Amino acid sequence: TQLLEQSPQFLSIQEGENLTVYCNSSSVFSSLQWYRQEPGEGPVLLVTVVTGGEVKKLKRLTFQFGDARKDSSLHITAAQPGDTGLYLCAGAGGGTYKYIFGTGTRLKVLA
Amino acid sequence: EADIYQTPRYLVIGTGKKITLECSQTMGHDKMYWYQQDPGMELHLIHYSYGVNSTEKGDLSSESTVSRIRTEHFPLTLESARPSHTSQYLCASSENFGFNEQFFGPGTRLTVL
């Protein structure tokens, strides 16, 4: 069974601080996606990474795909209250036709 | 903005009732999915579909059933609801597996009393 473990599970920080969320697996994925979900809504895609070692930047968010395509990280610089939400990674491929979602990281940024 | 819709948004029903959760998308996507999610927790895939007349069970065992008679419509049915079915149900679609974005509906929050 493929699993994606995210850490930390919960994170509460002050506005302006930096943070990193990790997504780890023992399985190889052909691509990995990061989603952000707000309460009462469905997840919304932030980024897709497909190449081992790939780094993508989206304003204050930096995403990295591990060289072996088994892990990924999301780094947020100077967090803002608007970044508050549930962050989910999702792996695709690896011999299946399904997306495997990570365990989630709940982020709260305090003003 | 994603063109994927779910109704109802909220549903409170008694044990033993039959319910159908509706999901429709207007993007022409072949791949559709149903996930179950407890508040603030990970998503568990319960059903997916490659296209019309194709449905598969996901990783999480579910007593629900699905059908895919039309590309745009992927309803989920519970024949006899129980309190253990209380959860949020999210529908999603994508153009293809793997590299393409999954577009999610807003979800249906189901409470079974």
Image (cartoon, coloured by chain):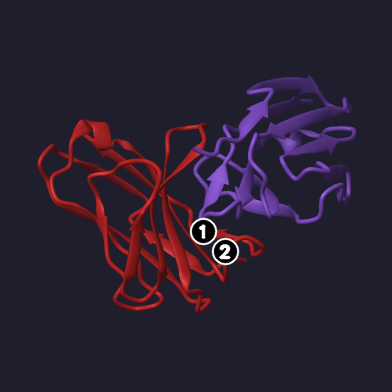
Chain colours: A purple, B red
Q: Quadrant of residue A81?
A: top right
- Tag 1 residue: A97
Where is residue B20? Give x, y as percent.
23, 57
Where is residue A54? Give x, y as percent.
86, 51
What residue type is disc 2 on?
A: Phe
Query: Horizontal placement of A12 versus A59: left or right?
Result: left
**Crowd around label 2: few <14 · some 14–19 · many ≥20 (10 Å):** many
Looking at the image, can residue B113 be seen?
A: no
Pick the front one: A95 or B93 = A95
Looking at the image, can residue A15 be seen?
A: yes
Which element carries disc 2, helix, strand or loop?
Answer: loop
**Crowd around label 1: few <14 · some 14–19 · many ≥20 (10 Å):** few
Tell me, yes or no, whether dots 1 and 2 are on the same chain. Answer: no
Query: Above or below — where is B52 with respect to B57?
Result: below
Q: CA distance from mark 1 to mark 2?
A: 6 Å
Cβ atoms at labels 1 and 2 below 8 Å apart = yes
Given this view, does label 1 or label 2 mark the residue nearer the observer?
1
